[in-house]
Image (tube, rainbow, N blue to C red):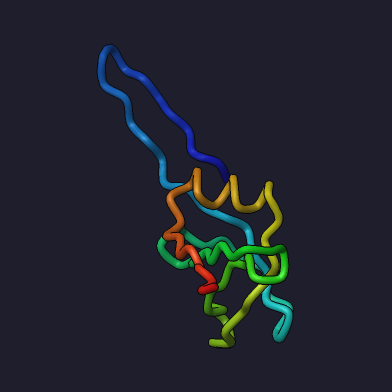
Amino acid sequence: MREMSVTHGLTATMAPVLFKAACPDCRSRFELSAGALRLAIGASRRTTFYSFTCPECGSSVRKPAGERIVELLTGGGVRTLRLHTTV
């Protein structure tokens, strides 16, 4: 579910952003708030991913994040960690 803005006169109200997710371990499907997700952006596709804890079974889940996923998560307020490499 994407963020929606409803304007009444001069006041705008923002609905919370929810992201659909699934657990590969228990196969549950659910919606998570931006606060339940973490995004790590690395130097390559292999080091860019998002993670969360399954609310059903408690498993830690880590999934790759391509450009579109990064765009959606950052736009939805997910906390982001930028991974840096040392040379």
Number of on-image labels = 0
Vertical placement of 14 versus 29: above or below? above
**Left or right: 42 as drawn, with respect to 9:** right
What's the residue at 45%, 65% (across, down)?
81
Instruction: Where is residue 38? Give x, y as percent.
Output: 49, 67
Instruction: Where is residue 74? Give x, y as percent.
Output: 50, 49
Quadrant of the drawing holding the C terminus: bottom right
Q: Residue furthest top?
A: 9
What's the residue at 59%, 46% (across, down)?
72
What's the residue at 58%, 87% (across, down)?
59
Quadrant of the drawing holding the N terminus: top right
Which of the two residues, 4 or 74, is positioned nearer the viewer here?
A: 74
Which of the two residues, 23 or 75, is positioned nearer the viewer here?
A: 75
Q: Residue furthest left?
A: 10
Which of the two residues, 5 or 69, is positioned nearer the viewer here?
A: 69
Q: Quadrant of residue 9?
A: top left
What's the residue at 54%, 52% (across, down)?
73
Instruction: Where is residue 85? Give x, y as percent.
Output: 54, 71
Instruction: Where is residue 31? Give x, y as percent.
Output: 56, 61
Vertical placement of 47 versus 79: above or below? below
